[in-house]
Amino acid sequence: MSPAQRTRDIERQAGYLKPEHCVPPPPRSGAGTMWFIRDGCGITCAVITWFLVLYAEFVVMFVMLLPARSAAYSLFNGVLFSGLAFLALASHAKAMCTDPGAVPKGNATKEFIESLQLKPGQVVYKCPKCCSIKPDRAHHCSVCKRCIKKMDHHCPWVNNCVGENNQKFFVLFTMYIALISFHALLMAALHFVFCFEEDWKKCSSFSPPATVVLLILLCFEGLLFLIFTAVMFGTQVHSICSDETGIEQLKKEERRWAKRSKWMNMKVVFGHPFSIAWLSPFASPDHGKADLYQYIV
């Protein structure tokens, strides 16, 4: 028997809850309170992410596009790249500052358990770390110090867990970063060709050595981010379509929820019905008829 199974067996014992050991939950903050994790590593990674995107914007606009001879080429690519970069940063901010689905802390009190009016034999789980009643498919995050509904993983780059409420924004973030990385690499390749054919002093407002260094750093950043975010985007889409989070796949947890179609699983995360809002980090998913939980009974 695995340690995870033994833990579950212990959790099924009524005495394991020990509600007398839990203090009443802290008062809930107002609805307008912003979610933000105070983690030094996560904040550093988030700042680095914004710095790298803004660095790419600087090189694309001031090194490659402004010196270009074609105004139409500069305008088209400038608007496209800046628009995608804006959507990437907006998606990052939403993924970072959206409650991923945190379970109320300290709600495993005697009063709350009695209010659930549990039927004989009905099982509830308590998290011993945050003293909360854990819903199905919730896991505890040691960084957020909370149980998160449908937690996929904790990502330091967005300084937050990826869970039930912010997975859409995390997927959009990886998609838009992959797109601007590919776009930057394509423009950098064309600019190198342009500079080799023309005088290096005419292809940039910076000196030739500075131009080369800036372009090489951009290419290195773009290639690294393209590979990383494309892989993350693919794994997230696969996880959504299979309706199995990264933690559930890693722990090989028993599937106790009903199987849905891949399209319905996408609607659960991005909203129901399908619309252009799927691509917007400013539109919170409207689940509509896409039930969040369907369990096998």
Image (cartoon, rainbow, N blue to C red):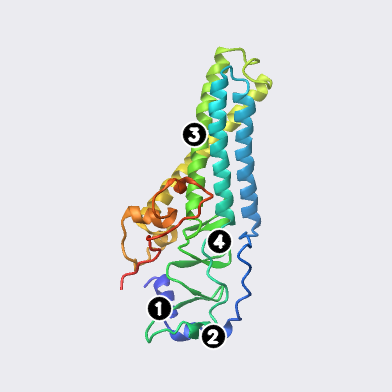
- Front: mark 4 or 3: 4
Which residue, given by chain and number where applicable, does mark 1 sit on?
Answer: 9
Q: Residues within 10 Å of mark 2 (few under 14, many from 20)?
A: few
Answer left or right for 260 relative to 212: left
Please provide percent x and percent y for residue 197: 55, 13
The mark nearer the N terminus, 4 or 3, is 4
- Front: mark 1 or 2: 2
The mark nearer the N terminus, 2 or 4, is 4
Question: In percent of the image, x 48 and y 55: which residue is there?
Answer: 167
Answer left or right for 59 relative to 272: right
- Amino acid at pointer 4: Asp
Which residue, given by chain and number where applicable, does mark 4 sit on?
Answer: 99
Which residue, given by chain and number where applicable, does mark 2 sit on?
Answer: 111
Please provide percent x and percent y for residue 49: 60, 44
Please tell me the numbered disc located at residue 48.
none
Does dot 4 land on a helix, a strand or a loop? loop
- How far is disc 3 from disc 1 in space, using C-alphas? 49 Å
Q: Quadrant of residue 296?
A: bottom left
Q: Quadrant of residue 215?
A: top right
Which residue, given by chain and number where applicable, does mark 3 sit on?
Answer: 182
- Amino acid at pointer 3: Phe
- Amino acid at pointer 1: Asp
